[in-house]
Structures are given as structure tokens and as C-alpha cells.
Image (cartoon, rainbow, N blue to C red):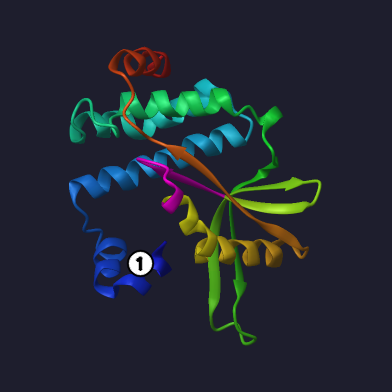
Amino acid sequence: STLKAVATCKTQAAMRYHLGYVSQEERAQLLSGTVIHEALATWFRGGTVDQALLTLYEHYAEWSANNVPPGDRLAYDNLAAVTRRWCQTHPLSEYPVQVVPSMVEVGAQAPLVPDGSIIYCGRMDVVGRTTDGWLVGDHKSTGQMSPMWLAGFEIDSQLTGYTWLLQQHLGAPVKGAFVNASEVAKLPGDFCSHHATLAGN
């Protein structure tokens, strides 16, 4: 993400990643994406739905209450309802990739040049296998999953970089990468309230 931002605009990248200057709306988007990652990490390590939601609650509920307008799609109630639904509809026993729990949110690094002066570093969201071989997955959340949004990943340098990095980390061929996408849209109010109450308990 940092490399992509630098390639787009060095000044904007420096303000966001070095100085931490972002708008309140951007901060909500960044933090909500981070806590979804953390909740899914709990889930993919074998945790229960409630354990995944507890992760979300501990890292986001209070901040959301103080910084996100009630009824917003990124408000805690809505985020908890979406995350609960995702976990319920994607049980690990039916997931198309056999996830390796010890390789969830796994950090790795490898030299890009022979003398080791340039190191490629990354933290891979999830690593798994199919009958065809190893795969690296990346969690993405968005307000709307459109064909154009999905098509953008076909040439995404983050995915190709992680595929290469996992191959260096394992010392074995890696088949490719996949995107674990979730659409964080605004759900009906009664649905959100019901599920957020369960998450809070």
C-alpha cells in the first residue's frame, strides 16, 4: 500500500504514511479496514464468530462511538453486522482454500538484489493451499464491489509482490494469489442493532 501511494504521489504518501495526516473520513476508512483484518485473522486462526466480533469490538466500538456518525456504514453496529454475516456464510470447513492457521498475518522479507541492499517486506493476510499448490490471500473491504473494482486486482503489484515473497519464504512454488473481499454497505437499522448487541456481549 505504501509503495502504491508513493508511485501515485510522493507528497500524499509522506503525509499519510509518515506524518499520519488524513481526514476524519479517511481515518474511519483506514481504521475500519484494519479492524476487519484483525477480526478475520481471529476467524482464520480457528476462532469462533463471537471471538472474531470481540476483536472488532475491543479495537473499534469506542472509537466509532466518538468519531463516526450514527447510521454511517462504517459505524460499529453496521461493521459488526457485516463481519458476523461474512463469518457465518464462510465457514472454514467450506472455504475453497485450506488455510494454514500459523500463516495468518505472517510477516516475511527477502532481498530484491544480490547484495541485500534492498529488502522487500510484507505481512501476508492469509496463506493456504489447494490441491494445485500454495496461495497467498489478501483481505479487502469496500463500500461497493463493482466489476471495475475487482478488475483492478488483476494488475495489482501488491498481489504479485506477495506471491513472489511467499515463494521466497517457503522455498517452494506458489500458484498465485486471491482476494478475500467484503462489501461494507449500509444495512437496515434493526439488523445492525440486533447483531451489534450480540457482538457486544
Residue found 68% across the figure and 52% down from its top? 135
Find the magenta span and give its range: 138-148
Q: Name the residue under label 1.
A: 5
- Residue reaching furthest bottom? 115
Above or below, 148 relative to 180? below
Q: In this view, does 89 lie above or below 162?
A: above
Residue found 31% across the figure and 62% down from its top: 17
In this rendered view, identify the residue nearer to me: 35 or 115.
35
Depicted 167 relative to depicted 179: above or below = below
Q: What element carries label 1?
A: helix
Q: Where is residue 36, by image quadrant?
A: top left
The three-letter amino acid code for the residue at tag 1 is Ala
Q: How many labels does the image show?
A: 1
Q: Looking at the rendering, in which quadrant would you find the N terminus?
A: bottom left
Q: In the image, residue 46 lies at what x, y percent?
A: 64, 31
Q: Residue furthest right?
A: 131
Image x and y of residue 148, in percent: 42, 53
Of 50 and 6, the residue lying toward us: 6
Residue drawn at point x = 40 percent, y = 16 percent: 195
Residue 179: image location, x then y, percent: 55, 48
Compared across the picture, whether 121 is left or right of 170 comes to: left
Percent from the top left, x then y, of residue 127?
65, 49
Going by the image, does 131 lie left or right of 45? Answer: right
Which quarter of the rendering shows the C terminus?
top left
Other-residue count near label 1 (Cα within 10 Å), few / some / many at <14 / 14–19 / ≥20: some
In the rendered image, residue 70 lying in the magenta stretch gets the answer: no
Q: In this view, does 133 lie to the left or right of 193?
A: right
Q: In which quarter of the image is residue 163?
A: bottom right
Q: Does the magenta stretch include residue 144?
A: yes
